[in-house]
Image (cartoon, grey):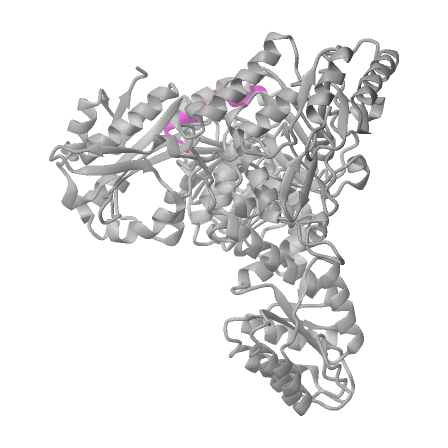
Amino acid sequence: MTIRNFDSLFCPVSVVLIGASATPDTVGNVIAANLLAGGFKGAIYFVNPKYSSVLGHPCYPDIEMLPQPPELAVIATPAQTVPDIIRSLAARGTHAAVIISAGLREAGLLPDVLETARVSELRIIGPNCLGIAVPGAGLNASFAHLKPAAGNVAFISQSGALVGAVLDWASTREVGFSAMVSVGDMADVDIGDLLDYFAADQATDAVLMYLEQVTAAPKFLSAARACARLKPVITIKSGRYPEAAKAAKSHTGALAGEDQVYNAAFHRAGIVRVAEMEDLFDAAEILSRAKLHKGERLAILTNGGGAGVLAVDRLIDFGGRLAALAPSTLESLGKYLPRGWSQGNPVDILGDADPARYERAMEILLADAGVDALLVMNCPVASTSGTAAAGAVIRAAATAHGKTVLTAWLGGDGTARARHMFATAGIPTHDTPDDAVRAFMYLTEYRRTQEFLMRTPPHHPEEQQGRRERGAALIAEAFARGRETLTEWEAKTLLAAYGIPVVPTFAVRRTDEVRAAAESMLTGSVMELVLKINSPDILHKSDVGGVTLGLAEPLAAERAAEEMYLRIRKVEPQARIEGFTLQPMVRRRNARELIIGMTEDATFGPVILFGAGGTSVEVIRDRAIGLPPLDEPLALDLIYRTNVSRALAAHRDKPAADVNAVARALVSLSALVADHPEIIELDINPLLADENGALALDARVIVRPALHGKGGGNPRLAIRPYPAYLERQVHIRDGTALILRPIQPEDEELYPAFLARVTQEDMRARFFGTREVTHALLSKLTQIDYAREMAFVAIDPGSGQLLGVARQISDSSYSTAEFALLVRSDMQRRGIGSALLHALTSYADSGGIILWGYVMPDNKAMLRLSAAAGFLTSPVEAGLLRIERKRT
C-alpha cells in the first residue's frame, strides 16, 4: 500500500540520527538539538563514529551497535555513505527513513537505495529535504530553526526553505501543526502518499501544501480527491507566470497554459488554491470552521456604509453572489431599523447601532430563504461598544438555521477582545472586508468543487465500438499518407462519428472539379458556399488567404479556387495541397462563436478547453480548462467558468443559446479523446451556438502514434473514466446470478449494511486486527482511481446489497500489487470469493501485474482459495504468511 509503514514515520517508538554532530550550527547538530528539545517520549539514538556523545547524549559508532532496532532513521551524512546506511538499517529492521542528505540523484545513487528500501519495505522521505516534524508526538526530526507548535493542520512542502518561512509566519499567528513534511526529491514517498495518510489522520483537520510541480499526476489527483472529500486541502502553487509559453500548432495548445491546467486539476480534485502564503492559513481556518450547506448568496450587515460598499466591490471582483433580499425581509428591516438605513443589501444599520439592533437585524436576515451566508461587520465608533455588539452577534449566530456567519471587526488592538470572543465561539473573524470576502470565496470554491469530486464519467467501449473503429480508420489513413494532421474533411467526419454536429463538407482535388461540386451544392436552401484550401500543412487557413466566403455562383467558386491555389503556392510554396473543400455558407443570425478543443499537458495529459472562439481567439483569451473524462454537469461547470458563458444567455433581441447542446459537444469531445490516444491537439473553431443547437464550422486534428490502454482507451488520462467495460454478470455455484463490477463512490452507502454482517473474526482476518470503520476509511475504500488501485464488488442484482469486495493497490511502477478480499460472512463458501478473485487476477494479468498479499496463518479459507488461484505461500515476520502469484 502507498502508506505502508507510515506509522513508523509519524508515530515511531524510537528514532536514530545518523550523522549527529557536536559542531555548532551544522545540520547534524541542529537536528540533534531539535530531537532532544522536541519532547519525544521514545528512545533517541545518535550515530557518528567521531563522537562518544553529542549534546550530552550518548553517540554510537555505527548502526549495528544500537541497543535496539530504530523504527525511524534520520540520515544527515554525505551522499556516498547513504546506500550502505540504508542497507544496515534494513538489516536491523528499520521501517522508515528521512534522508536529509543531498546529491544522491546527481551521483546516481538513488537506484541502489530504492531497491534496498523496496525489498525491505523501508519507506523514505527525501532525499534533499529539511525533515519532518510531528509536534503532537514531540518529534522534530528536522533542521528547522523554530519548533513547530502542536495543532490540527498538516503542512507538506516541496521547498525546504519555505518551511522555515511558514514556521515564522505560523508562530506569530499561533497556528499549530499536526505534522510538517519537507518532501525533498520524493524518491519514494510523494505528495499523493502523504495525502492518503493525512486523509485518514484524525489529528489533521486540514492539509496545506506548497507545490512547485506535481509528479505522478493520476496518483496525486486520486489521493487529493479522496482527501478533499473528508477535509480541506489547500495549496499555494509557484510558477504562475512561466517565462516561455509552450510552442503549439493549435489555438487550444496556445491557450492552455501550464498554470491554467494546474487550476483545472486543482478544481477537479477539490483543492482550494490560494495566491499568498498567509492565505493558506486564512483558508484553512475558514474551511475548518464553516461550510456553505445550501448556496452561495451572501448578505452583508454593517454599521458603516463604506465598509459595506468595499465588501460588495470585492465580492463582485471575486465572482461572488450578493443575496437579493426578499420583499418581506426588506419590510421587516424597515419596520425595525432607523429611517436612514440603506434599504437594501448591504444592510447599513448606521453608526449608532447598539447590540440589540445587530441581533434583531441578524435574525431577520438569517430567516430569509434567499440568504445562504451572512457577513457581519463593525466599524469602531465612540458611542457604542464593539465588544457588546460581538456578544449580540454570537447570540444571533447560535440560531442561524444552519447558515454560515462570518465577521469582520475593523480596527486595531481595540477589537482584540471581540475577535477573541468570536474565535472562542467558533465564528470565523477577519480584520478587513477584503479578508472576510476572500474567506467567503474560499467557502464558495470549496463547495463548488465538492459537488464534482465523486463524478467518474463512464467509459463504454463496447457501445462506442462503431464510432471508435471509424475514428481509428481515419487516423490510420493519415498515418499511411505520412501526415500528422487530418484533413478538414477527415476531421469533420471524425467529429460527426462522435455525434458532434458539423456543417456538411465536400472535398475535391482539382480546381476544375470545384465548379461541378458547387453546381450540385447550390440547390434548395443552400444559397452561398465557402471554399477552403485542403492542406495538411496549413492549419490556420485564414492567415494565408485559404478561405473564401459567400460564393453564390459555380463559376465564381472555380475562379476563387484558381486564385487561391496561386496565392497559397506563393506564400506557402512547400505546403502539400490536396485540393479544396466546399461547404454551405452558414448564416445564423443569433449564433455565438465558441471554441472547444483539447491539447496534451506534460503533467496532466489530455485537457479539454472551452472559450470564446473566432479569429481573435488568442487575443481575447477567454477560456476555461477541464480534465477529461467529462459528463454534462462537468461540461456545464467548464462553460460557466468563462465570461463568454454570459453571452450565451438571452439578451436584447437574441434568444438564449442551447447551452446543453454545447455541453453535449464537450462530452462527445471528451469521449473522442478517451478513445483515441493518438490525438494530441484538436480545435473546433468556431463552434456556433444559438437557440437551435451547436454546429462545428471548422476543425483541425493533430495526431501521432500512441499505445492504447486497458479497454482500448487513452492511458494518458490523469483521471481514469469509470471502466464500465469490466462490468459483467456471473453465476456462482448454486446458479445465483451476481453483478461483478468496479467499485463506485456511491457504494459507500452499501458498506454499513455489508460490514454489519461481517463477523469480528473475518474483520480480524481482513485487517489483521480491529479497525474503526469511519467515513474517512469508507471514502478511501470507495473512491479509487482505477489505475494504481482497482476494486471489484459483488452485488446482488435483486436487493442491490454488497456481498463482497476484492481490491488491489499497485506499487509506483505498476509491476506488483498488494491485494485483499472480504466476503460477507453469511455468504461465504458459495463461490463469491472465487468469482471476485478471478476478476482481480484477470485484471492484474492483463496489465502484467504480480499480485501478492498477507494472510494470517489461521485463515484457512483464504489460503485454500489463493492456492487454487495459483498463489504460492511463504512465511514472513509478525506471524503472517505472504502469498504471491506470478505473471501468467
The answer to whether 424 is drawn above or below residue 638 in the figure is below
Residue 416 spot, x, y in % from top left = 68, 74
Which corner quadrant of the image does residue 448 belong to?
Answer: bottom right
Q: Across the whole image, how many numbered discs are drawn on residues?
A: 0
Q: Magenta region, mostly helix, strand or loop?
A: helix
| Farthest residue, direction left | 734
Query: Residue visible at 26% across and 38% down?
Result: 739
Magenta span contains residue 81 = yes
Query: Residue visible at 62% across and 67% down?
Result: 297
Residue 7 spot, x, y in % from top left = 41, 42
Q: Quadrant of the N terminus?
A: top left
Query: Residue visible at 62% across and 61% down?
Result: 174
Chain part drawn in magenta: 80-95
Residue 171 spot, x, y in % from top left = 64, 57
Taking depth in this image into account, of 42 and 594 the one nearest to the observer is 594
Residue 692 spot, x, y in % from top left = 63, 46
Can residue 3 be seen in this snapshot? yes
Taking depth in this image into account, of 41 and 159 the one nearest to the observer is 159
The answer to whether 308 is drawn above or below residue 98 in the figure is below
Taking depth in this image into account, of 94 and 274 the one nearest to the observer is 274
**Side of 601 relative to 243 (left or right):** left
Q: Quadrant of the C terminus?
A: top left
Can residue 91 be seen in this snapshot? no
Magenta span contains residue 572 = no
The answer to whether 368 is drawn above or below residue 237 in the figure is below
Query: Residue visible at 77% across and 11% down?
Result: 512
Which corner quadrant of the image does residue 584 belong to?
Answer: top right
